Amino acid sequence: MSKKSFILRIDEQTFAALEKWAADDFRSINGQLEWIIDKALKENSRNLTKKKVEEAKAAALIGAGFDAGFNVPGGAYDSVQFQNANHSIRVNDAFMKAVENDETFTTKAVRDNSAEHAE
């Protein structure tokens, strides 16, 4: 999907808040704006998500007799997108040292900065 470039004028205070929010969510500023806009469109029923379009394709294929199982070669879900996802995370050296030394490392939740313990 191609993306349309455009100029956005916002005041410095709003930009600073957006920049911090993006950093807190581990997104670029552009990525944060896309997320905000997509969420607003969905919440206001202005956007049929790509996932819903792909699920409708799968339903049509199943209705036409294709196998409904996942990971079935030639099945309904074999030709639709958004069925699997790989998520990447950033970790720092302190985390990797804790893993190497079989130690406990405490992370912070992105939304509220609360402690999350991992063993």
Image (cartoon, rainbow, N blue to C red):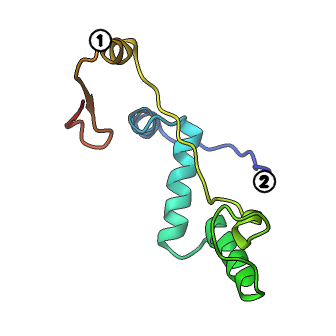
Tell me how far mark 1 sits from mark 2, CA to CA: 44 Å
What residue sits 30% from the left and 15% below the top? 98
Which quarter of the image is occupied by the C terminus? top left
Query: Against 94, is 46 above or below?
Result: below
- For label 2, the SS is loop
Instruction: Report crowding for label 2: few under 14, some 14 to 19, many 20 or more residues within 10 A (C-alpha).
Output: few
Residue 36 horizontal side relative to residue 99, left or right = right
Amino acid marked by disc 2: Met
User: Tags 1 and 2 in contact by the CB under 8 Å rule?
Assistant: no
User: How far from the left and from the top, in percent, is residue 113?
Assistant: 24, 36
Q: Which mark is residue 70?
A: none
Residue at position x 66%, y 65% in the image: 50
Q: Secondary structure at mark 1?
A: loop
Q: Position of residue 81 (x, y in %)?
A: 70, 60
The amino acid type of the residue labelled 1 equals Asn
Q: From the viewer's side, name the closer residue of 101 and 19.
A: 101
Q: Dot 1 surroundings within 10 Å: few (below 14), some, or many (20 or more)?
A: few
The foreground one among 24 and 76 is: 76
Say which residue label 2 marks: 1
Q: Nearer the viewer, residue 46 or 104?
A: 104
Task: Establish if 5 lies above or below 116.
Answer: below
* Percent position of residue 15, x then y: 47, 36
Residue 101: give its label. 1
Q: Residue at x 73, y 83 (%)?
A: 60
Mark 1 or mark 2, which has the lower sequence index?
A: 2
